Amino acid sequence: MKHISSFIGNVGDVLSNAGFSHYLEANNCHISERIEIRNFYRNVPQHVRRNFDDVFNECQQSGEELVIGGGGFLDYWVDQSRTATTIDVGLALVAETDFKLIITSIGSFPHKYVSPENRARFIEFMSVLTQRKNTFVMLRNDGSADELKTILSEDVFKKLYLGADNAYLLEPSLHQYTAKKAPNQLGEYIVFNVAPDQLHMDSKFRGEIDYEHFKKQILQTIRYVIQVLNKKVVLVPHLLSDVKFYIELCESLDDLMVRESVTLFTYSGQYNALQGYFDVYSNSSANVCTRLHANILSAMLNKKTVSLCVLDRVRAVAEQHQNLNAVTAFDGNFSDQISEYLLKSHQLENASNLYRLLDAFYSRVL
């Protein structure tokens, strides 16, 4: 089995693939090759860039199955792609091959402008893909199903599986992480995970977000946590761009406040850093999260969480969990709404059926 996904750099992707790896190991499934999705991107020099056509041909010749995902690889805004998605492969090759193809834990909820040409190419790709033999496509629980219902025919849509993000596959093994949890050395604190890159992305339920206003509201909330709630703040990055934003925040706060009450958590997009992320999210009093997998991890850990739903896919996940309190408007004093949620009593999450949904899918296709 070959597996194409994002394995390094983004903590959320690492978390999702950790769930998939745990599941495969528990079911005696073997991955022969892990292929980094970024090696297919057009910003990679052509002489070293990977090509989906080559991988499809390799799998056809060897009879090896191919897994692609998880991630937002079916977002259909990519201009120079033959499918309008990250999976840039020739449609004739898709139709002609018959090795087992599993596109899984996949998102399709574009956060950039989609041209009519891209929309048409994507619709054609999905038609060819769903007619292909030995092919299984599972959408993650991020609103992608509702999005695709609006553009795909009923015949195409009904061939898709409605599932969840692979991170939920960690639910049965969460005890392995929590049992090794490091002692809390910080006292009471609240995690902030804020994604500055998402502020410039498109959304169907909100207008443009003013960057400076958003930053001021986050600063107001941090001061409230420290001065009123008397708790510390831990800034948790999932990408390098998060670190740069956190430095901006710290430079805007009183120097003594930062020294005494703010911690910048170490950034690492490596698999061996996951334990540290489990520790920092699970030891907190509450979490304020923007990124998709920060919210998913908080949900699995049953933490009181304020979900800053800058993107539609995060709002979709927040609506599925009792302990995720959604903030969806960012043009007013949304700091007060965050503060109100932080004071609420914690509503325990009911047992998730998302692992069982994933298990049912993989039991059938692997």
Image (tube, rainbow, N blue to C red):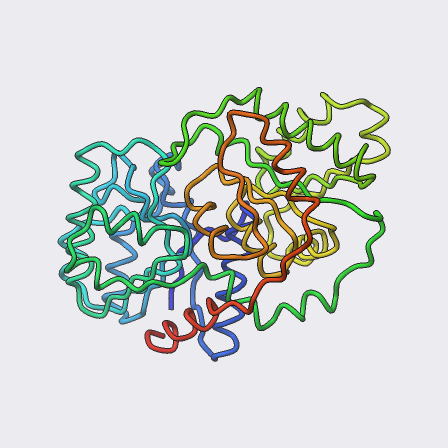
Lateral position of residue 31 relative to residue 324, left or right: left
Q: Nearer the viewer, residue 65 or 32?
A: 65
Percent coordinates x, y for residue 256 in the rendering: 86, 26
In this rendering, position of residue 136 left or right of residue 268: left
Q: Percent position (x, y) of residue 293?
A: 53, 51
Relative side of 36 to 114, left or right? right
Q: Nearer the viewer, residue 136 or 281?
A: 281
Q: Quadrant of residue 157?
A: bottom left
Q: Position of residue 92 (x, y in %)?
A: 13, 53
Q: Residue at x 30, y 47 (%)?
A: 147
Looking at the rendering, in which quadrant would you find the C terminus? bottom left
Vertical comparison of 58 with 291: above or below: below
65 or 222, which is in the foreground? 222
Q: Residue at x 50, y 58 (%)?
A: 16
Considering only vertical position in the picture, is 189 above or below 159?
Answer: above
Residue for point 26% across, 58% down: 56
Above or below, 80 against 286 in this view is above
Name the one closer to the observer, 128 or 174.
174
- Residue at horizontal 73 percent and vertical 38 percent from the top: 264
Quadrant (top left, top right, bottom left, bottom right) of the N terminus: bottom left
